[in-house]
Image (cartoon, rainbow, N blue to C red):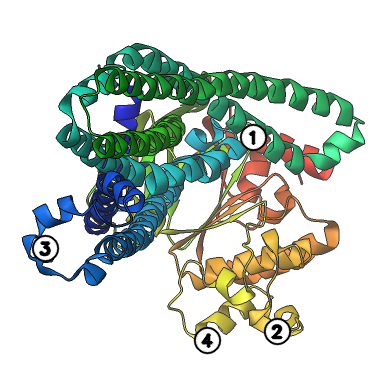
């Protein structure tokens, strides 16, 4: 079985495959760094002899590499070693510059791709799938987990390539100088394998626990901020703080254990490196079989090997962090897209109707719809009414392909919804929900969300139909006014009318109004209701409502109870039957059916 470290490196390289050219260029720069480092080690012995003899000796290796240097006058030959050092230093500097630049670009491209994939995946998940995760935990995967991958892609990949190459070249220099000393020094490597592997496995486990616990904390913070008024209203700050402290303690324990495993790797390397250097030096001095300048170059190579080896141990921990982060990211990326399977048929704009036959659906163990057969005719307003939990919003979710039925069919004219592309199904609808869903952008960007190619005249017309044009013109920058997060600078009624304008501008064949006025105060509700009366003229609409006064003029009213259609007709017809709708009407208005 491959080690966690190897798997992490393999996954990082797979993520970076589209940008392999950057990695190849950076690898060339790393080769310059490694070769120049080996050159330094090779020159240490000659440099020492050169200094101790006042320039009388120490250039023999240069003369062996370039015999023409022997013909240089002595005063010029004295500059050979200093110039060689300068050249090697310049080559190493250029190599470092190129390596950091190109590997930095590599890491950035990997992270941009990964964040794009995560965000696009989240956009394709159904509401049920998203609700299974705390939003703060998902945000943690998008930020801190991706940051761990970025750190590994930028530093670990570069270090593994550069430092491994440096180690190979420096070991090659050492073997060239004295193969016996090299064998002695490298004898400590097998000793380090088992404890290092165990420490790595322990670090991976602790890191995985810590990343998961951090995601839980992020989820609680997000949840707490969203429910801050409720927490304060119930004086529950202390309870929430205690819950946070318990979760923080879990993170602290995991990270403390990871720190012990992390500290063990460099500590082990330090001990083994001193054993290798001390053993080599003792053997060389006792046997006197190695020339002093050769011994100095050998020890220089051995000492220079220690730094990249230590760097490998350090950045490998980044790879383990990235491995734990990638597990959490992959858990999101591999979620099945339940509402997106199958269909390839593009649904044209609706002409006649949407027909449901024997449709069933459950949220876990709770049955939401049970054998619903229903037709939504084009050009008509259909209202869905019923008590909470009767299946009204679930029906809208199935129409929009947020979920798929467990039984039955939904047909758009003659096309089965499961055979159609999701984009073409959703293109049939414009949705307005009870919560005004606006973005931290300008009014123009919010209204044109579903149809960015719309003209200025079409934008104005949609805003006028939604009774939003007058108040929009009064804003400081008009349509270009930034409205803040979730439209915080607007009133409830203004936000909902802006959502109506967006729905009108989209020119979708069917408008879905899901409790569009239920969260508004009476004045705002009257404003939005007046706008709705203008919007619905001549349009196909599906209106979900608890307040029955708002749907009394609908062409068709469908009453749902326990996931079934129990009544269907106009307002007058249903009141005359004295059935379930009449009961709901009496409860809603406080007066009996008339």
Residue of label 4: 456
Q: Nearer the viewer, residue 532 or 326?
A: 326
Count neighbours of disc 3 (C-alpha within 10 A) and say few if under 14, some if 14 to 19, many if 20 or more. Answer: some
Count neighbours of disc 4 (C-alpha within 10 A) and say few if under 14, some if 14 to 19, many if 20 or more. Answer: few
Taking the image as shown, residue 72 lies to the left or right of residue 261, namely left
Identify the mark nearer the N-term, 2 or 1.
1
Q: In the drawing, what numbered circle is on residue 70?
A: 3
Q: In the drawing, what numbered circle is on residue 71?
A: none
Tell me where residue 479 appears, x and y as whole percent: 64, 81
Q: CA distance from mark 2 to mark 4?
A: 15 Å
Give the answer, above or below, for where 498 lies relative to 551: below
Q: Nearer the viewer, residue 239 or 13?
A: 13
Identify the mark nearer the N-term, 3 or 4.
3
Identify the mark nearer the N-term, 3 or 2.
3
Q: CA distance from mark 3 to mark 2?
A: 81 Å
Residue of label 1: 219
Tell me where residue 123 appears, x and y as whole percent: 45, 49
Label 3 or label 4, whichever lies nearer to me, is 3
């Amino acid at each position: 079985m491959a080690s966690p470290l190897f798997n992490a490196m393999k996954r990082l390289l797979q993520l970076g495959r589209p940008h392999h050219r950057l990695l190849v260029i950076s690898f060339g720069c790393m080769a310059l760094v490694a070769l120049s480092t080996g050159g330094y080690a090779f020159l240490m012995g000659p440099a020492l002899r050169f200094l101790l003899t006042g320039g009388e000796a120490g250039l023999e290796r240069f003369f062996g590499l370039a015999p023409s240097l022997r013909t240089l006058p002595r005063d010029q030959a004295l500059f050979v070693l200093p110039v060689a050092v300068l050249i090697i230093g310049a080559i190493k500097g250029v190599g470092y510059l190129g390596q950091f630049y190109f590997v930095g670009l590599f890491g950035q491209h990997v992270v941009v791709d990964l964040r794009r994939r995560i965000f696009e995946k989240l956009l394709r998940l159904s509401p049920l799938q998203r609700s299974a995760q705390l939003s703060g935990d998902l945000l943690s995967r998008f930020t801190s987990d991706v940051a761990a991958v970025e750190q590994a892609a930028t530093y670990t990949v570069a270090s593994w390539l550069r430092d491994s190459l440096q180690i190979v070249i420096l070991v090659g220099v050492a073997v060239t100088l004295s193969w016996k000393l090299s064998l002695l020094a490298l004898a400590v490597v097998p000793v380090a394998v088992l404890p290092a592997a165990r420490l790595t496995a322990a670090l991976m486990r602790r890191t995985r626990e810590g990343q998961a616990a951090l995601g839980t904390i992020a989820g609680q913070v997000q949840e707490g901020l969203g429910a801050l008024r409720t927490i304060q209203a119930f004086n529950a700050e202390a309870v929430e703080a205690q819950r946070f402290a318990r979760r923080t303690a879990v993170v602290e324990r995991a990270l403390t254990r990871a720190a012990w495993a992390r500290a063990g790797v460099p500590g082990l390397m330090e001990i083994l490196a001193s054993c290798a250097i001390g053993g080599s030096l003792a053997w060389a001095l006792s046997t006197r079989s190695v020339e002093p300048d050769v011994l100095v170059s050998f020890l220089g190579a051995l000492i220079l090997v220690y730094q990249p080896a230590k760097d490998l141990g350090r950045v490998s921990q980044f790879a383990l962090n990235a491995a734990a982060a990638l597990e959490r990211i992959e858990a999101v990326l591999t979620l099945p897209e339940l509402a997106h399977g199958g269909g390839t048929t593009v649904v044209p704009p609706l002409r006649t109707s949407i027909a449901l036959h024997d449709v069933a659906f459950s949220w876990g163990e709770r049955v939401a719809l049970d054998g619903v057969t229903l037709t939504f005719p084009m050009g008509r307003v259909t209202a869905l009414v019923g008590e909470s939990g009767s299946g009204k919003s679930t029906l809208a979710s199935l129409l929009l392909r947020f979920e798929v039925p467990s039984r039955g069919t939904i047909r758009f004219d003659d096309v089965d919804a499961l055979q159609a592309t999701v984009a073409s199904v959703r293109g049939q609808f414009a949705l307005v929900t009870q919560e005004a869903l606006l973005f931290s952008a300008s009014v123009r960007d919010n209204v044109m969300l579903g149809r960015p190619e719309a003209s200025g005249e079409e934008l104005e017309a949609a805003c006028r139909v939604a009774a939003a044009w007058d108040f929009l013109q009064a804003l400081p920058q008009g349509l270009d006014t930034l409205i803040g997060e979730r439209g915080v600078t607007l009133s409830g009624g203004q936000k909902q009318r802006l959502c109506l304008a967006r729905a009108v501008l989209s020119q979708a064949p069917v408008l879905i109004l899901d409790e569009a006025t239920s969260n508004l105060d009476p004045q705002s509700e009257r404003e939005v209701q007046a706008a709705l009366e203008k919007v619905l003229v001549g349009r196909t609409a599906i209106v979900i409502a608890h307040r029955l006064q708002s749907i009394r003029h609908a062409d068709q009213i469908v009453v749902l109870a326990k996931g079934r259609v129990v009544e269907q007709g106009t307002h007058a017809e249903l009141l005359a039957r004295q059935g379930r709708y009449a009961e709901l009407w009496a409860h809603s208005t406080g007066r009996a059916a008339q």
